[in-house]
Image: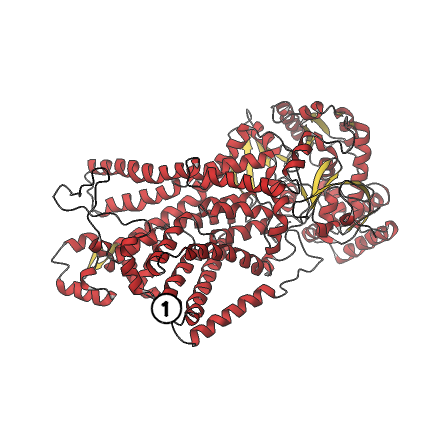
């Protein structure tokens, strides 16, 4: 039978490094069921029958944080054969606090005393042998970063698992509380697993709601326990939870006094402290933060020569998936006699290749960004980001670390959503994932350009307002959402460790980068590819004069596309006869006509913008391309000119080659402008900026939420918010600018503003103090 | 009552008592701020909140609002 070993320890204790060292590349990364917490397991190098289960980094086994509950549930319910508890040797006191709790689980355990190289370098001394005697568990000195001692830890853990015995362990619950815990043990003996007797007795003494829930004790037993706890609390003049915590720390202080010798005087500055004095300095802190953020943006997202991320992704999109792959697939299909214009060719080239391309095209940029973020995390700067920005962001229910996803999302929402990974608190993470794509990303800029150019004479105010609307939406959504039960409670208590700075490990950073990129491909990829294929199908297939097929092909057949049919289609779709295009007969146009009444209150209840909005889900810049097709750009297109010679271009049949539509669609501005009032155009822009993001970003949201309900809630919320804001823009804006008089629309618009104001200022859900938890701890966890 | 919030930067104080209850108090205690422990106030964040402490040999940050729940001498 397989041996299962759990790896537990504090955050920043080197747990990931040890895990990587023990398992090598044989890891499986997933999520703990139903939550956004990452789950990793792997086979021990050289032992196919030993599975190492990495638990989340935790400080305690309290019932209040998601990570702690996940770990407890695993340890109690899955009963691993042994635990490796990694302890940061440079920070022994706080690390041993978790150790004392793990010891009570009566599972064979080995303590891996990590960072011993640093301890020695600092001139400190830790007497591991004595520590081992004091605790009653084996303690082995290691340096995970240098790979020293990790083999020995694994061997000892296997031996401990095989022996199955737990020696006599020190109990840190002493004195009166110790007696009380013994009494509770007597009360519950027989009704709990003997192995977890001590664990449960301590938890019951602490009135741990999750443990009480899991045990199902009789009312009589509960009353007896409560009496024992009350008596002890009265005698010690403190609450039971605090009594236990105090005892643990007091006993740990006694143990470390005998086993640890620090060379440094108290508060003497270490190198890390000196760095931190500058980095989070009151005056320099914010400028340094701004510079670091600018560098991240410049390298990963910006449009300059140094912007490796953008250049790599442009290369992947335009060259690899724009030329090479389609070219290669095209010649391959040609060799197989699958001609251009056939259904199969279209499906493969425009559906599958384009869909896969839109997944993989993002990956280079994402890898560059994740590389930078991993380095910042490994160095220890990410904790400082939260430290510096906390005051601003907690005003609207987000974490200081939410700044990075929002910043990244101005380039692209997909890595923006993925960057929320660095936020520890699940509620903050969900909130950030839900709101970060409100930022106008690079692909939304052409939409802004089109509306600004076509309707507002290119006013720069429109672009500025787009950013204002994006940031405003994030702030308002934060304030509104945190008043709902699902997000309620104090924004995660900001009791956060500021880990010592250290030099990042190359392999660790590269591995973390790759893991994040790969998990996007794996978990978001299928959604993106399938949705792209569906939209391809809808926009290319349709019924032309009673015949179903590729509309493009059917339109070439003059026996099908008769003059009467064109007249009828033009009439049905409300376009001039000379501007009828194959797409007018597509399924998507039909869907657009059916759905468009929904947008009538927003001023653009016409099938064309509806269709453009739907194709925008594939990629936001597609909105312009779709407008180009629907407003029959071909009819106004000028002849293309060779860029070098300045000569007019002709194709092989001597027909003039038409110039491509510009990025912001300048050529169709006149035609677009005729169809919209300024406020309707603005409402269209607002809706498209804020509604459900592109499929790639939806895939990223699905990956981060790890939960269908939350994914739909996020998309639903964004679309609803977009609709409401677009409604207000059109109706209230229209009334103010005099497009129409006061009526039902403006009245509803004003009512909506009133509702938003109410949601902003209302008191909101107040969690009951006694059941309030640090994060939304899922109900099914024990 | 003097609380950690009122403690000037650069001073070392001893914890007398923790107020409040439930998760936040537990979290503060889990991180090592317990009765009798010495806390050195390292600095304030650039915007004045949160504060950075040195406790039990490591750096910890707490919000001013939470520091107000910690009575010191």
Density class for disc 1 (Cα within 10 Å; few <14, some 14-19, many ≥20) is few
Which residue: 45% across, 55% down?
Answer: A464
Residue matched to label 1? A600
Q: Is residue A378 left or right of residue A669?
A: right
Outermost residue, right side:
A235
**Colour convention:** secondary structure
The answer to whether A739 is drawn above or below residue A774 in the figure is: below
Q: Give residue A706's position: percent from left, percent from top.
A: 51, 48
The answer to whether A302 is drawn above or below residue A130 in the figure is: below
Q: Give residue A753's position: percent from left, percent from top.
A: 51, 68
**Observer-nearest residue: B69 or A628?**
A628
**What is the secondary structure assignment of the residue under circle 1?**
helix
Is residue A776 visible to the viewer in this orientation of the structure? no
Which residue: 56% across, 61% down?
Answer: A480
Is residue A645 visible to the viewer in this orientation of the structure? yes
Q: Chain of mark 1?
A: A
Callout count: 1
**Observer-nearest residue: A407 or A740?**
A740
Q: Give residue A359's position: percent from left, percent from top.
A: 39, 43
The answer to whether A271 is drawn above or below residue A300 in the figure is: above
**Observer-nearest residue: A47 or A117?**
A117
| Quadrant for the N terminus of chain A in the image | top right
Q: Give residue A425's position: percent from left, percent from top.
A: 60, 48
């Amino acid at each position: 039978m397989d041996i299962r070993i759990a790896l537990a320890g504090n955050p920043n204790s080197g747990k990931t490094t040890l895990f990587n060292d023990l398992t090598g590349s044989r890891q499986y990364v997933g999520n703990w069921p139903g939550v956004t917490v990452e789950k990793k397991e792997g086979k021990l190098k050289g032992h196919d029958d030993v599975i190492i289960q990495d638990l989340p980094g935790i400080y305690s086994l309290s019932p209040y944080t998601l990570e702690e509950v996940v770990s407890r549930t695993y340890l109690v319910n899955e009963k691993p054969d042994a635990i490796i508890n990694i302890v940061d040797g440079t920070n022994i006191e706080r690390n041993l606090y978790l150790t004392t709790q793990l010891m009570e689980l009566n599972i064979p355990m080995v303590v891996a005393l990590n960072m011993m190289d640093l301890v020695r370098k600092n001139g400190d001394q830790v007497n591991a042998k004595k520590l081992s005697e004091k605790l009653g568990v084996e303690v082995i000195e290691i340096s995970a970063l240098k790979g020293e001692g990790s083999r020995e830890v694994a061997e000892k853990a296997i031996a401990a698992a095989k022996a199955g015995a737990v020696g006599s362990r020190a109990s840190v619950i002493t004195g009166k509380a110790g007696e009380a815990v013994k009494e509770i043990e007597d009360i519950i003996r027989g009704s709990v697993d003997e192995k977890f007797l001590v664990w449960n007795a301590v938890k019951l003494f602490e009135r741990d709601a999750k443990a009480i829930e899991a045990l199902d004790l009789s009312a009589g037993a509960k009353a007896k326990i409560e009496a024992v706890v009350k008596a002890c609390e009265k005698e010690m003049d403190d609450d039971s939870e605090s009594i236990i915590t105090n005892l643990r720390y007091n006993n740990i202080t006694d143990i470390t006094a005998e086993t640890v010798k620090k060379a440094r005087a108290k508060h003497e500055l270490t190198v890390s402290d000196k760095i931190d004095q500058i980095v989070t300095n009151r005056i320099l802190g914010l400028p340094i933060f701004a510079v670091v953020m600018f560098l991240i943006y410049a390298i990963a997202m910006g449009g300059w020569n140094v912007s490796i991320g953008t250049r790599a992704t442009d290369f992947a999109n335009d060259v690899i998936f724009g030329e090479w792959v389609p070219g290669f697939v095209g010649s391959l299909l040609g060799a197989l006699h699958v001609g251009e214009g056939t259904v199969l060719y279209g499906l493969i080239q425009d559906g599958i290749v384009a869909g896969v391309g839109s997944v993989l095209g993002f990956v280079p940029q994402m890898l560059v960004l994740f590389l930078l973020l991993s380095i910042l995390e490994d160095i220890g700067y990410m904790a400082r980001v939260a430290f510096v920005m906390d005051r601003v962001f907690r005003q609207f229910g987000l974490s200081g670390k939410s700044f990075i996803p929002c910043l990244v999302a101005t380039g692209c929402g997909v890595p923006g959503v993925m960057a929320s990974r660095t936020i520890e608190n699940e509620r903050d993470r969900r909130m950030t994932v839900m709101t970060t794509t409100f930022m106008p990303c690079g692909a939304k800029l052409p939409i802004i350009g089109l509306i600004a150019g076509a309707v507002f004479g290119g006013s720069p105010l429109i672009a500025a307002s787009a950013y204002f609307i994006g940031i405003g939406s994030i702030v308002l959504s934060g304030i509104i959402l945190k008043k709902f039960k699902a997000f309620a409670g104090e924004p995660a208590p900001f009791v956060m460790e500021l880990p010592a700075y250290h030099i990042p490990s190359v392999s660790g950073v590269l591995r973390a980068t790759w893991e994040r990129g790969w998990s996007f491909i794996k978990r978001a990829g299928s959604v993106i590819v399938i949705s792209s294929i569906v939209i391809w199908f809808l926009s290319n297939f349709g019924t032309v004069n009673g015949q179903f097929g590729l509309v493009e092909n059917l339109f070439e057949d003059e026996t099908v596309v008769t003059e009467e049919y064109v007249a009828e289609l033009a009439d049905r779709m409300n376009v001039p006869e000379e501007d009828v295009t194959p797409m007018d007969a597509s399924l998507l146009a039909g869907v657009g006509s059916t759905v468009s009444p929904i947008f009538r209150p927003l001023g653009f209840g016409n099938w064309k913008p509806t269709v453009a909005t739907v194709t925008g889900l594939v990629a936001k810049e597609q909105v312009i391309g779709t407008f180009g097709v629907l407003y029959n750009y071909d009819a106004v297109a000028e002849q293309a000119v060779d860029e070098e010679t300045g000569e007019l271009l002709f194709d092989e049949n001597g027909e003039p080659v038409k110039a491509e539509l510009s990025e912001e669609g300048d050529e169709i501005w006149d035609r677009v402008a005729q169809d919209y009032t300024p406020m309707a155009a603005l409402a269209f822009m607002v809706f498209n900026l804020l509604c459900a993001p592109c499929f790639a970003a939806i895939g990223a949201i699905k990956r981060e939420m790890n939960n269908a309900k939350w994914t739909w809630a996020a998309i639903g919320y964004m679309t609803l918010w977009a609709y409401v804001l677009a409604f207000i823009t059109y109706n209230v804006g229209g009334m103010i600018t005099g497009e129409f008089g006061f009526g039902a629309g403006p009245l509803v618009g004003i009512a909506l503003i009133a509702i938003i104001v109410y949601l902003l200022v209302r008191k909101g859900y107040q969690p009951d103090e006694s059941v309030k938890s640090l994060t939304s701890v899922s109900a099914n966890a024990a | 009552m003097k609380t950690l919030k009122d403690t000037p930067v650069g001073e070392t104080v001893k914890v007398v008592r923790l107020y409040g209850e439930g998760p936040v108090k537990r979290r503060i205690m889990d991180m090592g701020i317990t009765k009798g422990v010495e806390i050195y106030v390292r600095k304030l964040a650039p915007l004045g909140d949160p504060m950075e402490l040195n406790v039990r040999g490591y750096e910890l940050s707490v919000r001013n609002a939470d520091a107000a729940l910690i009575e010191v001498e």
